Amino acid sequence: MKIAIIGATGLVGGEILKVLEEFQLEITELLLVASERSVGKTLTFKGKSHSIIGMQEAIDRKPEIAIFSAGGSTSLEWAPKFAEVGTTVIDNSSAWRMSPDHQLIVPEINANLLTDNDKIIANPNCSTIQLVMVLAPLHAKYKIKRVVVSTYQSISGTGMKAIIQMRNEKSGEKGEMAYPYPIEENCLPHCDVFLENGYTKEEMKLTNETKKILDPNIQVTATAVRVPVSGGHSEAVNIEFEEDFDLNEVRQILNNTEGVTLKDNPETNTYPMPLYAKGKNDVFVGRIRRDESQENTLNLWIVADNLRKGAATNAVQIAQYIIEKQLVPSA
Ligand code: A2P
């Protein structure tokens, strides 16, 4: 497989390189692509130095797969050009997620929807991926009516600029701001831009993408908050089911779900935290308890590394799936 990584110098791009090494995909040629200002610089993959190339050169070399993590406008402009030369694009931006002509994929849940006609495949939003990984097996068993989710999102989701802002604030230096306010010692109830309905785009992504992936009948309402954590998103989730559940059975279901790790024991202070999810591919779930204010309702806490399962790992899993199922022609 000839694989191109678009946005290779970015935070997600760097994580994709790590995950590609760990997953041991058979890569005959790796094309590392970034903006013109990075062309000619080098990055290391499996101990070998690779030069960064520009977008057009990557298209001319017709990779079988291109994984995009370079922002929505770059995807909108360039992904169709890769698709035109026969490349299958896996896109981390929000550009194609809600398009009825494009699949929105979390491999453990709905990779079976993919065919060799899917030339641009959308990777869901980081907060959505970790949420649906936990909701999917519970929906299959008890049918979810409504979800109320509050997020505690790390600054790595905003990209390198946000990491630099927090570093500058810690060291007392002045510099470019990724956010309208300081993030250190602060919480911003503001992820992505505000929309006309008063919600942020991130909050509506959580609602709309969850419905598209799982079931349009599930009601979802979200509050997304940026917190001064450098890696790993957390979510407090309230889930109302059609049917009643047994708490032990809920734990058992989640414990048996591929890609989900249960960390739930109040007696030993065991619960998921971003510090321990960092660098891991799984989604962690704990604090599982009945909502005593309403029937058939559950509270839980979900944490995952947003750069891993929220972006890089999910994208590489999609690549692995389409290679294994021969949905891309081999080199
Ligand atoms: P560059 O490093 O050359 O700016 P992050 O979200 O962590 O800031 O990363 C964004 C990634 O997207 C970087 O690799 C960045 O490259 C890349 N990128 C941004 N704009 C473009 C573009 N127009 N064409 C290709 N890559 C781009």
Image: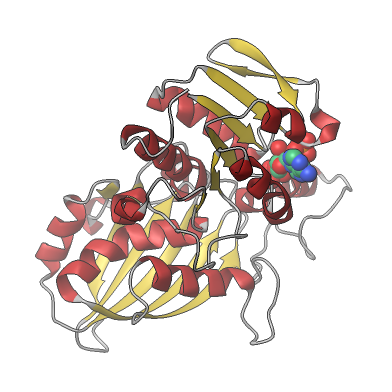
| Front one among 219 and 276 | 219
**Which residue is at 14% across, 68% downward?**
247
Q: Relative to residue 248, is residue 198 depicted above or below?
A: below
Would residue 56 be seen by someone viewing this image from the given angle? yes
Q: Residue furthest top?
A: 48
Q: Pinpoint residue 43: horizontal percent, then vertical percent.
A: 67, 20
- x and y percentages locating residue 26 in the rendered image: 42, 20
* Of residues 226 and 145, the one drawn nearer to the viewer in this rendering: 145
Residue nearer the viewer, 81 or 279: 81
Residue at image x 49%, y 76%?
222
Q: Nearer the viewer, residue 84 or 286?
A: 84
Q: Which residue sits at x=15%, y=58%?
A: 253
Q: Picture quarter containing residue 140?
A: bottom left
Is any part of residue 270 visible from this angle?
Answer: no
The answer to whether 11 is drawn above or below residue 156 in the figure is above
Q: Quadrant of residue 181?
A: bottom right
Q: Position of residue 306 (x, y in %)?
A: 51, 49
In this rendering, position of residue 267 left or right of residue 196: left
Dividing the image into four equal quarters, which quarter contains ligand 1?
Answer: top right
Q: Left or right: where does residue 51 sit relative to residue 311?
A: right
The percent position of residue 218, horizontal first and vertical second, equals 34, 80
